[in-house]
Image: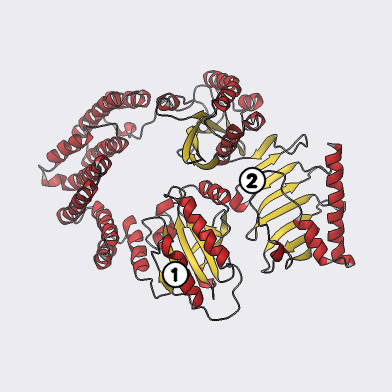
Amino acid sequence: MLKRILNWTMRSAVCLLCAQGLAFGQSASKQVEVVLQYKPVQEGVEYTIPSAEDAANCKARKIDGGIRVIDANGMTLRELIDTNSDKLPDQWRYFLNGLEVYRESDTDGDKTKDQFSWYNTAGTRQGVDADGNGKIDQWNVLSAQELTAEIALALANGDAARFDAVLLTAEELKGLGLGEEKYELIKEKLLKARDGFTASVEAKKVTAAARWMQFNGTRPSAYPAGTDGSENDVEFYENASAVVHDGESDIEIAVGTLIRVGNVWKAIDAPIIATPDNINEIAANNVFIRFATNTPAAAAPGAQSSDELNKIDEQLNQAQTIAEMSELHAKRADVLEGLAKNAGSVEERAQWIHTLADGVTGAIQQGVYPDGIARLQALMETLKESEEDKSLAAYVQFRLMSSEYTTAMMKSSGTAWLQVRTKWLEDLDAFIQNYPDSPDAAEAMLQLGMENENDGDEEKAKALYSQILTKFPESSSAVKAKGAVARIDSVGNSLTFAAKVLGQNDKQVNLASLKNRVIILHFWATWMGDATREMDKLKEIAAKYPKEVLVLGVNLDDDAALAQQFVETNRMSWYQMWEEGGMESRPANALGIFNVPTIFVIGADGKVISRNAMSTELLALVADAVSAVPATKPAPAAEK
């Protein structure tokens, strides 16, 4: 320890001389050389490391309290800061693409780095190393997504100390103020967690080569104060999991219930590799939610029926086989039909029928109600008998044909999917003709337009999109349709597009501000096929044309943390944009994006060259675009 501190102090002193050298005439090249020698204490930090050739063109600049190193384009690479005026640096800042992504700090002046923080595209973590061994002992800030990444890394490396750092402590458990039943349940889980972690490590189902890919979980929930003796509201996730890529396989790691303590999310269970054999056991491992229902029970006219719905939903959550779930879904549909029949108003009846149709459709999509389609067909037949039920019939019909399409596609093999798709197109067209005023007609037009685009019939697709804009201008489908028309008409024209920077809601990239460079605008998501291979091709182009081409990514994941982790893991050095909403986000809707990847190639004159470039042809398209660029000085990096 003493040797490490002495070495650190000597390097700090040298660095201080560099900072002072700005005032006393020391060699600027020496300042750059020394600063760039620093490396992060924590593993896995992705930051800009210039080549030897690029480093020779870097410059040192004096800033308030320290020194900044910038590259030839003026983008910041490193900053060393003295915050307490003791003439030694106590902050080491690392940058990626000009953005600070990681910081190390000596907060108590003992010449040992004790606090580590991640920023911008690198995440939100902030950890503390209390004993000076370079490992984080506790977290001050840790999101649920980053918590699962820590658990996955601990499991992959057999690092029990890393796992201990994210476990709920006994003091934190007491501080939650839970009632006795929940307190004892969590306490029991915590007592078993360390042994469970050891067992999972010894199973060796995840290797050290595993890379965290994504967080799986619904929206966070709140356990309200006053429930079963609880003194405080408690935020939690149930049944959370992480997906890691290990070799050629994706592995799901169940991490159970996660609980928020201030700015830190904590685990209470040992990680378990999810398999088909244990999935039901994992699903039943909840702490706070034993069952969930979206049924508007409070609005039910019969308390007995509402209670019965609640009981069925609880039984569904505990059911172990498809046969059990199918039987329960049938009973649930019976109850809802009864509620609709005895409804006190037209509006209330419509609400119950909507709930019935949505519930059966969801069960069909999950594959747990084989008779669900027949149930929707029977409901449809009763609604068709009355002209007054036409709007309800349209609602049920759209979900029926969607369920039939999804089920048939899942069962199709070989070229049978072609016939399934043909029927789907016919169904969409028939729905539009039979129910032209139904709100679902807008979605049917959008789906049909998308399919026509895929078939290359862009004129028919545009006609459908335009019909949505005319007839359903206030619908959510109209937003996507307007963007789709703009995308189809973009080739040969300037593209209007701007989006917020991933991790920085106060900043955005605007195409209008980028001049004299060929731009690749890449819409992508972590869940798309061959995502890593796609990024490798973009890296190849970016490396080949570092000054002529600017790559811009637009991530369409629902969760920004997933995108940030993927960017970090795959070392994607170009600018990334992200806004909430995934495939229905504002950037996706602005250009009517239905599929990922979608790649635009934009010439140096700002005109779109291609709006649906294949990754296999991208290099040739870019090469042609670059060759057409006049021999002028390239523009700086993307403006924000």
Mark 1 lies on a secondary structure that is helix
The image position of residue 455, as x and y in percent, is 26, 60
Q: What residue would you read off at disc 2?
A: 44
Does residue 94 appear left or right of residue 408 in this picture? right
Task: Inspect the image, locate mark 2, and give the three-letter code of the amino acid beneath it.
Answer: Gly
Residue at the far left: name it.
385
Quadrant of the rendered image containing residue 275:
top left
Q: Residues within 10 Å of mark 2 (few under 14, many from 20)?
A: few
Q: Nearer the viewer, residue 612 or 493?
A: 612
Q: Are marks 2 and 1 in contact (CB under 8 Å)?
A: no
Can residue 475 be seen by looking at this rendering? no
**Quadrant of the image for the C terminus?**
bottom right
Between label 2 and label 1, give the one nearer the viewer: 1
Residue at the far right: name it.
24
On residue 621, the disc is 1
- What residue lies at 72% left-to-right and 57% top-to-bottom? 78
Circle nearer the N terminus (2, 1):
2
Q: Nearer the viewer, residue 473 or 41?
A: 41
